[in-house]
Image (cartoon, helix red, strand yellow):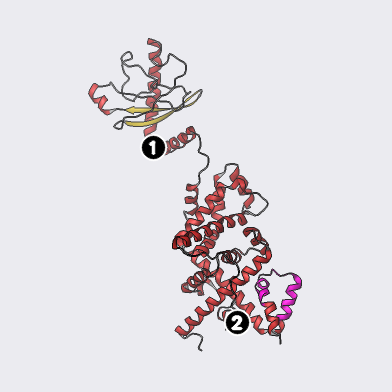
């Protein structure tokens, strides 16, 4: 059985650097996926991931064992991502959307469309690259804090409790942000799939 | 058939419903509504599909990335408290010993030989220069850019002493045996030891081992 996170953290604190390498290897892919969903750019996502681990190592003494190691790791990751996004927006002179109160467009043209097109368990092999790219793009349409919640939920399967702890927000906020983020992404994906089907003629059978 | 207003009440809960995050009572309420509302069944299915899509899609993108040297790169960026100078020296010397064992061995042999010679010379002609005081302080450490430099570690009672062996080609050719040898210690309170090249032992009174520059 793999050594648990807290044991590894203890070993790192007592000077065992290999234990830290194990932690990195355990979480690198997940941290990267979250970072990629947040910042979209591959290289930036890679930088963020490295930065997150470097920071975690640096502040390991500040990590109290009262939360899971991974909630702490993801909090650091998300915060670095948000910094990157703000710097990027500032560089472009854009107003940064600071979250909250996105209007929910209740016009649902095609209920059940996504579910019937894709089923609830799409296989990786069946999923096309363009669709994956579209998902990534759709994610960018969601305010950063909503996006963070959505990614942590979908990629890490975090419970609402853990999400609340990771992002330091009430559980009710987790619930409503997830709901809004999903609604928005669904709209974008539906539109994309419609266009796609109109183009290729699939769905007309 | 469920009313439109009923849907409005339940729609915001569907997301938490598919996540299994509703309270038992809320869940029962949603399930009851679903049994009467095909629209909301469709909505829940959409949410599940979307959830899976995001997961699979993002995993797919991460699959493109090669993580083989990721942890290595992270480890390289870590800045632990700098190990003491001596530790760092041991590490780099350890590498030297691993990769250039042959060369080092001959230098070490030479150093030991030189030490013996030095000892003999001490016995014959008294203390060599620089040995007047029991401990010497190193002021500067420098090497000639043209010289061939190789470090050798000799264990002494007080700890490791790192000794530079410098063979100066020009000096060797010009004066035939009148080599320049520098012996430098690493830490201030370490006993320096004389060291010599593997070339024939010098005439004892002509050249005596010297300590580091004082």
SS at badge 2: loop
A50 displayed left or right of A61: left
Q: Residues within 10 Å of mark 2 (few under 14, many from 20)?
A: many
Question: Is residue A70 positioned above or below A111 on the image?
Answer: above
Q: Which mark is residue A112?
A: 2
Q: Residues within 10 Å of mark 1 (few under 14, many from 20)?
A: few
* Viewer-nearest residue: A32 or B90: A32
- The region drawn magenta spans B11-34
Location of residue A145 by image quarter: bottom right
User: Which residue is labeled 1 in the image?
Assistant: B100
SS at badge 1: loop
Residue B42: x, y in percent?
63, 81
Location of residue B177 by image quarter: top left
Q: Is residue A135 magenta?
A: no
Residue B74: x, y in percent?
49, 50
Residue A75: x, y in percent?
59, 57
In this orientation, does residue A47 appear?
yes
The number of numbered discs placed on residues in the rendered structure image is 2
Magenta: predominant secondary structure element? helix
């Amino acid at each position: 059985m793999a050594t648990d996170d807290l044991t590894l953290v203890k070993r790192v604190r007592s000077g065992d650097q290999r234990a830290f390498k194990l932690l990195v290897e355990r979480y690198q892919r997940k941290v990267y996926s979250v970072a990629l969903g947040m910042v979209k750019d591959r290289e930036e996502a890679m930088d963020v991931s490295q930065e997150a681990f470097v920071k975690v190592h640096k502040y390991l003494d500040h990590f109290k064992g009262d939360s899971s190691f991974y909630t702490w790791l993801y909090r650091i990751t998300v915060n670095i991502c948000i910094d990157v996004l703000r710097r990027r927006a500032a560089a472009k002179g854009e107003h940064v959307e600071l979250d909250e109160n996105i209007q929910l467009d209740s016009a649902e043209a095609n209920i059940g469309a996504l579910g019937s097109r894709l089923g609830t368990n799409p296989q990786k092999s069946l999923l096309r690259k363009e669709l994956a790219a579209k998902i990534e793009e759709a994610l960018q349409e969601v305010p950063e804090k909503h996006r963070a919640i959505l990614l942590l939920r979908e990629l890490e399967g975090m419970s609402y409790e853990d999400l609340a702890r990771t992002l330091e927000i009430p559980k009710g906020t987790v619930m409503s942000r997830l709901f809004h983020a999903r609604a928005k992404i669904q709209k974008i994906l539906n539109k994309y799939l419609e266009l796609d089907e109109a183009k290729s003629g699939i769905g007309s059978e | 058939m469920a009313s439109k207003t009923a849907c409005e009440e339940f729609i915001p809960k569907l997301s938490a419903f598919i996540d299994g995050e509703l309270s038992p009572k809320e869940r029962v309420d949603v399930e009851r509504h679903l049994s009467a509302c095909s629209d909301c069944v469709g909505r829940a299915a959409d949410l599940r599909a979307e959830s899976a899509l995001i997961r699979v899609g993002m995993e797919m993108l991460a699959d493109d990335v090669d993580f083989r040297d990721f942890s290595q790169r992270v480890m390289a960026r870590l800045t632990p408290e700098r190990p003491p100078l001596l530790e760092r020296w041991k590490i780099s010397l350890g590498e030297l010993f691993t990769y250039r064992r042959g060369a080092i061995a001959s230098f070490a042999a030479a150093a030991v030989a030189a030490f013996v010679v030095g000892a003999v010379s001490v016995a014959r002609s008294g203390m060599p220069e620089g040995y007047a005081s029991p401990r010497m302080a190193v002021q500067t450490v420098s090497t000639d850019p043209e010289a061939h430099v190789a470090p050798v570690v000799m264990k002494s009672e007080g700890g490791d002493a790192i000794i530079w062996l410098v063979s100066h080609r020009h000096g060797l050719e010009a004066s035939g045996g009148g080599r320049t040898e520098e012996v430098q210690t690493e830490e201030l309170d370490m006993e320096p030891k004389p060291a010599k090249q593997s070339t024939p032992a010098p005439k004892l009174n002509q050249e005596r081992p010297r300590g580091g520059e004082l």
